[in-house]
Image (cartoon, grey):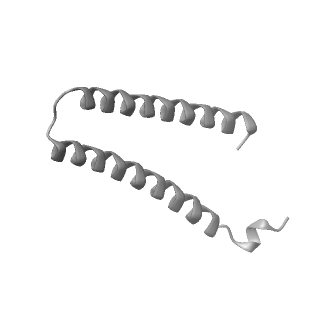
Amino acid sequence: MSIGRMMGLYLLGGGIIILAIYGLYEMLRIMLSTPINPIIFIAIVAIILGAIVLLISTAAERKKEDLKEIKKEDLKP
């Protein structure tokens, strides 16, 4: 990939991550300011953390598989 494309992808991903973190912050701020059942709060936090862990592990696994598929013959000029 070219440098411009990689930089664009990093900026896009960074912007999405910043918006997601801000959204989670606002959601937690509103949830903590209103009376809510603690079990529901814990369940929502567990769902959010589980989704984040799944996304990160899937991305890491794909990256690892991409590196495994390159054969030595492909690397020779």
Image spot of residue 64 (x, y percent): 58, 64
Give whichever of 45, 71 is nearer the camera: 45
The mark tally for this picture is 0
Residue 26, placed above or below residue 1: above
Instruction: Please state if 76 lies on the left or on the right of 23 as rendered.
Output: right
Quarter holding residue 2: top right
Instruction: Please state if 60 lies on the left or on the right of 36 as rendered.
Output: right
The residue sitting at 31% across, 30% down in the picture is 27
Give whichever of 7, 26 is nearer the camera: 26
The residue sitting at 43% across, 28% down in the picture is 22
Image spot of residue 49 (x, y percent): 36, 49
The residue sitting at 46% across, 28% down in the picture is 19
Image spot of residue 76 (x, y percent): 82, 68
Residue farthest left in this picture = 37
Instruction: Please state if 8 lies on the left or on the right of 49 as rendered.
Output: right
Instruction: Please state if 22 lies on the left or on the right of 38 as rendered.
Output: right
Give whichever of 50, 2 is nearer the camera: 50
The residue sitting at 85% across, 64% down in the picture is 77
The quarter of the rendered structure image containing the N terminus is top right
Residue 23, placed above or below residue 49: above
Residue farthest bottom in this picture = 72
Residue 67, placed above or below residue 55: below
Quarter holding residue 25: top left
